[in-house]
Image: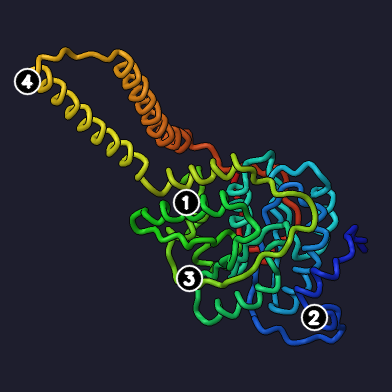
Amino acid sequence: MHIQFRSDPIPQQVLAKTYPLDSLWSSKAAAVPYDTCVTCVIPCLNEAENLRILLPLLRSRLSALCTSWEIIVADDGSTDGTEALMAEWTQHRGFRYVQLSRNFGKEAALSAGLEAATGNAVICLDADLQHPPALIEQMLARWAAGAEMVYAVRETRADESWVKRSGARWFYKLLSSARGVDVPAHAGDFRLMDRGVVDALIALPERTRFMKGLYAWVGFKGEALPYTPDERLHGDSRFSGMRLFRLALDGLTAFTTWPLRLVSLVGVVFAMLGMSYAAYLVGEYLLSGNPVSGWTTIVTAVLFFAGVNLISLGVVGEYVARIFDEVKGRPLYVVRRRQGVASRADKATGTG
């Protein structure tokens, strides 16, 4: 059966930055350097236009690098043409499509792709073309040399606002305070993982997933690979300021207890201040006979401490909510459809 792919022409700026033109479309068969199976996992949400460009790039690159490969698109409830596009691509061996029943979030979609992966090495990258496929060769080289995880680290964040850069810096500092977990700053989901790393991630039982922290928690031998992200060609990022805040909050509550300790510390400090002020008032009255006055001060203090109490309850509530989510035991995601053939027929994949 012959399938005509409805794909856009690859922009020259993407093509030139990714592969030499003569090597991408060369008709000469060259020996591949890696006799192994490599899986690329692409979580996406309404990225059909970018996938039309990314999929042929990855196919050409992987075909030139390894003897066996597969590309898994984990669709997190897209409403554009992603489903129709993947119905065409999955007619060819090596392309697989995991469609979730609704939008469960990027972490869930990424987990679905990892559970479906069958490769000895698994590479995660976004569908927005900001993760250069050209780095795959360097990742494989470091993996072949012994690295069990190769994570791409952004060299600069100059394209982001000062608020976002500052927030990211403080977030990684706070996250690094977690005992036994060293999360590399400015490292995202763009990485290569050995089969053992992927199996360890899949075995983790928690429902509220913060993948950047889980990558660090499972350990293994990792190496950083500096890179500069490319520009997004189509669409806008789905990560608004509020979604980033929620993701950061999930990360902090999943891997640190410092918010609870901070609440305790604030309580101790204010208790000491209150006792000191009470002792001062008693001493003032006993020594000088001045009566205690100042209803405005009292009302202000009551309102202030009421606010502190509510904030403290909110922090505790976040941890209780995480416990509630875990106790319910619901699946991390629900799969609506799977398409495509796995590279290894003997590998059972997926849950939900």
Q: Nearer the viewer, mark 1 or mark 2?
A: 1
Q: Nearer the viewer, mark 2 or mark 3?
A: 2
Labels 2 & 3 near each other (Cβ < 8 A) = no
Numbered circle sitting on residue 50: none
Q: CA distance from mark 4 to mark 3?
A: 67 Å
| Residue 126 relative to residue 28: left or right | left
| Residue 267 relative to residue 90: left or right | left
Numbered circle sitting on residue 222: 3
Helix, strand or loop for disc 2 = loop
Labels 2 and 4: the sequence-earlier one: 2
Q: CA distance from mark 2 to mark 3?
A: 29 Å
Which residue does the numbered mark 4 point to in the structure image? 287
Labels 3 and 1: the sequence-earlier one: 1
Which residue does the numbered mark 1 point to in the structure image? 171
Nearer to the camera, 21 or 200: 21
What's the amino acid at mark 2? Pro
Labels 4 & 3 near each other (Cβ < 8 A) = no
* Residue at x-position 78% and y-position 50%: 235
